[in-house]
Image (cartoon, helix red, strand yellow):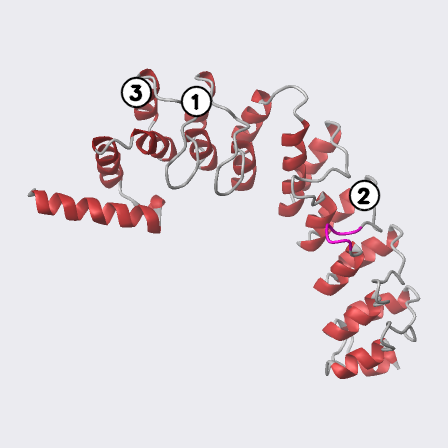
């Protein structure tokens, strides 16, 4: 292969890596690692070896004294992030034996290796990293709990609740498990959290009633759960906008029917004087129908 041909192939490999690292052939991936090492990007070669499940390459770099926690220059992930995200348990074990920091954040995605393992569904690696966490490291458990709610993983939620994680904990962004479960429409996860004491009257991180956000998203079954667990049907914003106003404006006819069944006041007025009927009229939603064929015009009259 001429120097020009080699350069063109390396360029193609580089582009393929940025487009889809998983699409690289084994030979191209091996060549890329060789090229990275040749140009002095040993940290990138090391982390990409972990990404690709190349245990021998990873161990060779470790034996040479490379920093186990070095981050990829472009991706901002350590080798442990790479291995955990891609399901390479043997490499995760190898890195942990060499002192890899399981609590280190990636510089771009702001995720720990444990969070990545949970997100990608690598449960055995998640358990391994969890055992490697510092005793009493509540932050990792809180992040995992909220992430499990976002993904609707009721089995993980049950386990963490059994381990003593409090149902009201939030992640580092101030988002609770209930906020995520409800927002994503995970009915069973929402039911589980409410059963364990999550507050149906809680506010979002922006200070608005979470129940109204549920209504806004049109999650009828979750709205009923909130009501059954004590959310006031007349809960409103500072501008006196109720759930019925929101459901009417969005054309969520089944939700309007549900709210009325729980005694929502269809004569309630917002701060600007609008009734739910008026809001639906202005939004051209009066012809929206319930699953039983009843229109909002009839429901809200």
Q: CA distance from mark 2 to mark 3?
A: 49 Å
Q: Decide if residue 291 is on the left or right side of residue 140.
A: right
Magenta stretch holds residue 95: no
Mark 3 falls on what kind of element? helix
Please name the residue that numbered disc 2 is placed on.
Answer: 198
The spot of residue 172 in percent (x, y) is 65, 39
Q: Quadrant of residue 192?
A: top right
Magenta stretch in the rendered image: 203-207
Please name the residue that numbered disc 1 is placed on.
Answer: 95
Q: Residue at x 87, y 77 (%)?
A: 273
Question: 10 Å neighbourhood of mark 1: few (<14), some, or many (≥20)?
Answer: many
Q: Residue at x 75, y 48 (%)?
A: 190
The spot of residue 149 in percent (x, y) is 67, 44
Mark 2 falls on what kind of element? loop
Residue 60's label in the rendered image is 3
Q: Looking at the image, do the residues carrying marks 3 and 1 touch, with CB atoms under 8 Å apart? A: no
Question: 10 Å neighbourhood of mark 3: few (<14), some, or many (≥20)?
Answer: few
Upstream in sequence: badge 2 or badge 3: 3
Q: Is residue 92 visible?
A: yes
The spot of residue 49 in percent (x, y) is 33, 31
């Amino acid at each position: 292969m001429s120097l020009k041909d080699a350069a063109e192939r390396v360029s193609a490999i580089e582009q393929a890596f940025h487009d889809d690292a998983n699409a690289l052939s084994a030979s191209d991936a091996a060549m890329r690692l060789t090229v990275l090492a040749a140009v002095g990007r040993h940290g990138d070669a090391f982390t990409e070896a972990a990404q690709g499940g190349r245990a021998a390459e990873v161990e060779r770099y470790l034996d040479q004294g490379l920093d186990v926690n070095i981050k990829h220059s472009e991706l901002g992930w350590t080798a442990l992030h790479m291995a955990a995200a891609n399901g390479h348990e043997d490499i995760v074990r190898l890195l942990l034996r060499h002192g890899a920091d399981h609590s280190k954040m990636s510089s771009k995605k702001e995720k720990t290796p444990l969070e990545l393992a949970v997100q990608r569904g690598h449960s055995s690696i998640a358990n391994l990293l969890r055992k490697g966490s510092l005793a009493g490291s509540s932050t990792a458990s809180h992040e995992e709990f909220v992430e499990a709610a976002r993904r609707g993983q009721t089995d993980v939620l049950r386990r963490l609740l059994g381990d003593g994680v409090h149902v009201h904990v939030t992640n580092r962004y101030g988002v609770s498990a209930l906020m995520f479960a409800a927002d994503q429409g995970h009915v069973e996860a929402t039911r589980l959290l409410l059963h364990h004491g999550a507050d149906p009257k809680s506010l979002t991180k922006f200070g608005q009633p979470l129940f109204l956000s549920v209504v806004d998203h049109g999650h009828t079954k979750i709205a009923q759960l909130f009501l059954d667990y004590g959310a006031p049907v007349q809960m409103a914003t500072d501008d006196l906008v109720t759930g019925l106003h929101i459901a009417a404006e969005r054309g969520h006819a089944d939700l309007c029917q549900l709210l009325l069944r729980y005694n929502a006041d269809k004569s309630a007025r917002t701060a600007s004087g609008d009734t739910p009927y008026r809001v639906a009229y202005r939004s051209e939603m009066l012809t929206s129908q319930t699953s039983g064929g009843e229109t909002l015009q009839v429901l809200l009259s």
